[in-house]
Amino acid sequence: MPDKKKPTRVKRRERKAIPKGRAYIQSTFNNTIITITDLSGNAIAWGSSGTAGFKGSRKGTPYAAQLAAEQTARRGMEHGLRQVEVYVKGPGSGREAAIRSLQAAGL
């Protein structure tokens, strides 16, 4: 008779108290990706227009970048993040919207 496996618990990532970090916004014509890291570069939270629920050509819009930045900022603030340095890369239309959204979220 084979041994029964015990159900394993999925380890939850612990919430660290990180007051300062960096927000990297990569904005292309097709998508906007926001990554929030601590000061040493370890990713805390990330999001994109695709993870915000947009598909196809709508991912490249400023509104999609705004929603993605809001969601990512909320996840970063759960880790105690209060202040970020923003680094922007790329020519896309979501650049300014993502920056404004991070600022409106309180980062």
Image (cartoon, grey):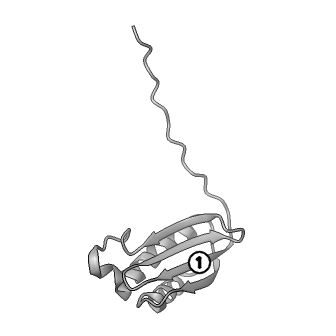
Residue at point 64%, 79% (across, down): 84
Q: Residue furthest top?
A: 1
Vertical placement of residue 14 versus 19, above or below: above
Question: What kind of residue is marked 1?
Answer: Ala
Percent x, y for residue 14?
A: 61, 52
Percent x, y for residue 81?
A: 62, 71
Vertical placement of residue 87 versus 51, above or below: below
Residue at point 56%, 69% (across, down): 76
Percent x, y for residue 52?
A: 36, 71
Residue at point 32%, 70% (across, down): 53
Element carrying mark 1: strand
| Left or right: 85 as drawn, with respect to 9 | right
Vertical placement of residue 17 versus 2, above or below: below
Percent x, y for residue 98?
A: 47, 85
Residue at point 50%, 75% (across, down): 34
| Left or right: 12 as drawn, with respect to 17 | left
Image quadrant of residue 93?
Answer: bottom left
Quarter holding the C terminus? bottom right
Image quadrant of residue 80?
Answer: bottom right
Q: Which residue is mark 1?
A: 23
